[in-house]
Structures are given as C-alpha cells and as structure tokens.
Amino acid sequence: MEILNSTIVITGGSSGLGLEMCRQLIKKGNKIITCSRSLEKLQNAKKELPELIIYKCDISQESECEGFAEWLRINHADLNVLVNNAAIANKIDFVNDLSSLEKMTQEFLINFHAPIHLIKLLYPLLIQNQNSRIVNITTGLVYVPRVIYPFYNASKVALHFFTQVLRSQLKEEKIKIIEVLFLAVDTPWHEGNPPKIAITAEKAISEMLEAISKNKTEIRIAKVKLLYLLYRIAPSFALKKINSL
C-alpha cells in the first residue's frame, strides 16, 4: 500500500536522502515532520518545502528524544509512520585514531541506539493509528563492510538484525516493519566525490517508495541487489569489490 495521507516523522530530513524523502512524500499529500541537530539546516529545508514541519533535536541525547516524543504526542497524535533515517559515519583507522572510541560511541548512539529509543517511545502512538509503519534505513554494507567505516558498518548491522527481530515479534500486530538498504547515492555524504556506481537521491527514494507500495519489507535499492548476490555466492570477492570503489 502506497504511503498517502499519512503523518510521518523522518529523522535527519534536513539534507541528502532524508530531504529527498520529505520532498517526495510531501508531493503525495502527506504531513511530514523532520528533526535534526542543526536548526540552520532545518530552516533551509523549510525554505524549500514550506509545508515541512521542523523540530530541532539531537537524537543522540535520550532526553531530547523523550522531549520530541512528548511534543509529537501532544501536537501530532495522528502519527502513523516513523522513518529512522539519521546516521553518521567516520572514516577512521581504528588503532591509530586517538579519538576512535569517542567516534564509536557517537556513531552507535545515532545509528543504533536512537532508532530503538524512538521506536520504544513512539510505538504506543503509531500502533493506535491506521496504516502504521516503522521504516529503518540501513545499507548494503550490512552484507559486506567497507573497511574505512568500522563503526558505521557495525552499527547498521546491529540495526539490520534488530529490524528482523522486531518484525518477527510484531508479526501479529497491525504495523509494518520495513528495512530499506541503500548503497551509493549522490548526496552531500560523499562531499562532492560520489563513486561511479552512485545513483541520484531522487531515483533512490522513488525506488524505495515503489517497493513500499508493493508491501515489500526488506528493500534492497539499486546495486544492493547485486552486492547481496555476490555476498551469498562469493563473499571474499564481494569484500574486495566493495572496497575497490
């Protein structure tokens, strides 16, 4: 079923893939709420999309997640879709980077802990509304890691398996648990130097929304399909291939 006439929270929707999600879902007549740590980015997003509802929130902080959830309960009780999109990644040499443990903590807080915390806080609201969905954004790197992203890989693998468990535990409930796995998308993430296999954010989100409309629950976008097959058939080759990009 297509996502229409819904009230949707998208974390990290002020730029990149998240902003493109906001853009396309607003066009479909949905009410979109997004949060970000950066008020400036949120305000810029709202200039482009005046219908967008913005809320400044650092999801790595439990108290701010709780405040956001309470604000949603009071102001947007019709919430029926949560998209856990916000994420960070650090390119590091684990042993030689003096701040590697600090970066590890921050990545796991944002990429893994925050989505779970928001699901726990917002589930009572989501489940009381029609056509409810939880959408967790992960990556094809859950199958084959890129060695430059030691914590991003690991945090997304954790979210990947948590999503599978949550889907199983809630299989009798009227809520869909969806995972969307992206790989290379031409966004500011790549700092102006996207890999050759990168697709546009518009194409990536269009493919995502089409798959959701067909009731798919584990959605592999573009080259993730190929990476998954390589991982199943020749894992060592897949590891070399993904790290040669």
Image (tube, grey):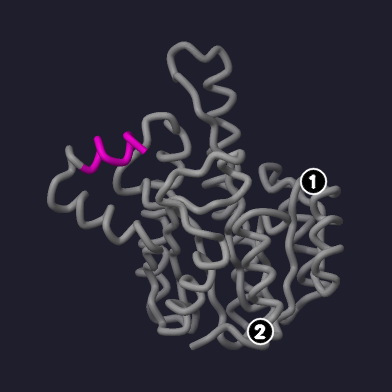
Helix, strand or loop at mark 2: loop
Helix, strand or loop at mark 1: loop
Q: Residues within 10 Å of mark 2 (few under 14, many from 20)?
A: few
In magenta, the rendered stretch is 238-245
In magenta segment, residue 242? yes
Give the vertical position of 24 relative to 20 (above or below): below
- 235 horizontally vs 18: left or right: left
- 208 horizontally vs 21: left or right: left
Q: Which mark is residue 28?
A: 2
- Asked whether 62 or 230 is in front, the reply is 230
Image position, residue 40 (x, y; %): 85, 48
Residue visible at 50% across and 28% down?
A: 91
The amino acid beneath tag 1 is: Ser
Residue visible at 44% across and 56% down?
A: 182
Answer with mark 1 or mark 2, whichever residue precedes in sequence.
Answer: 2
Residue visible at 81% across and 53% down?
A: 56
- Asked whether 116 or 9 is in front, the reply is 9
Image position, residue 219 (x, y; %): 39, 68
